[in-house]
Amino acid sequence: MSPTAFKQQVTQLLAEMTTCYQFCDAIRENRRLGSTHEALDKLQSDIKHGAWNIQSAYDELRHDCGSRVELGDEMARTALNRAIRTVQSNIQTRLSEIAYRQRDSHNPENPGFRKLNDQMTNVEADVLDELENLGTRFKNATAEVSKPAAPKQLARPKLKADEVVILSKELDVLMQHLKSSWIETSVAGEIFYVNAFDDKKRQWERPNGFIKAPHRTVPKPTTHQQTWEQPTRRPARDDTWSNGNGCQASSVDPVLVRAALRSPDEVALLCRTELEKGVYGMLLGTERALVTSSRDAYMELRKFYVAFSYHMSHRDFKEFTNPANQICQLLQSHFLALQLTMTPVTNNEWVEKDRMTKHGVTSRWFGALRRDIPEDMKGYYEWPMWVEKEVKHDRLYNGIVTREVEVEF
């Protein structure tokens, strides 16, 4: 058993709840809703807040009880397994059927969003109760462990304020360390080294041992980074990687990567608010990661969904989806283009699902995003509009690059 088995279960449960949230978005896109759809709105809102509550409760328990929470115990792992199965089999399956018309029903209670919301609320309550019970069991187990009797301490001699008592063996180790330690010194641009034990011992060559470097002032960062924006990593490039299901995800064609990297440079000058700069930073981080690692690019792409589902405030999310905000509409179109460009990487997520339906729904969002753009903004939509054209001709799903694309980009 993994030493982080319980932590992995909590992560899986949050991922399943995020998938349910995305199915609610698909229902709004694919199905015709009535004039009032409070039940769907409440279900989607409760899913988002439920996931946040579970994550917060786990983090608090981890802070109070330490790393043993990551393993949990048999009772906690059984309860989490039951919650995951309920979300997968009862809630997620039903939302998928509604979103993609996989089953028709004339039952007046269909689609039953209130019933699904009740089930999700019960799952949240059960998980929160189990986290609280797990913390109680850990605290009781700690209290029951008898503390060993403290050994008798020998009377220590009275010392002055600047004196300590150490063993002779420890003194020898400290003296040896001090003799092999050096202080880097610079005079008139020339660097030499002074021994920490004997300041008369100096040399120009860099010595072996510990070297204390001179103090250097580190400039403070001037840009503010959003809490949901994470720094990117640049490892060596890997061509394929496993998605956990035994499948190998290919890297994106270099021509498409270069096209993706060229486009954000033009958009950067338009971003003014912290929200716009934060989304632009995540776009740039994902596109740069494509150069070296398809796996890292996929992990960067997932940060968008985490930000939209958990970290982005309601005000920022409302502003980001505001049709009147031309910059955010532009950023949305670039996000969709990037998502479809990475189809060779993300294809393996949809091995057992309707992949073409998902991509078709995503590509149709381009039309709404560029519907009313002014003339002076059309140049910034060049790359997203090209991606839309390639998707319509079914060329981008397999990473196909035509000769005209190589000339264009």
Image (cartoon, rainbow, N blue to C red):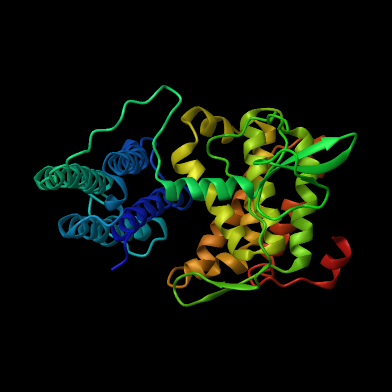
Where's residue 153, x and y in %? 21, 38
Image point 37% across, 59% down: which residue?
A: 96
Q: In which image quadrant can residue 258 be found?
A: bottom right
Q: Is 167 displayed left or right of 337 in the figure?
A: left
Q: Is residue 346 left or right of residue 327?
A: left
Toward the top, the furthest residue is 161
Total marks shown come to: 0
Residue 381 visible somewhere in the drawing: no
- Res 235 → quadrant: bottom right
Q: Is residue 352 above or below residue 329?
A: below
Residue toward you, 199 or 292: 199
Q: Is 131 displayed left or right of 229 in the figure?
A: left
Q: Residue at x 72, y 38 (%)?
A: 199
Q: Position of residue 179 (x, y in %)?
A: 63, 47
Q: Position of residue 109 (x, y in %)?
A: 22, 49
Which quarter of the figure is the C terminus placed in?
bottom right
Q: Is residue 315 left or right of residue 184?
A: left
Question: Is residue 360 in sight in this rendering?
Answer: yes
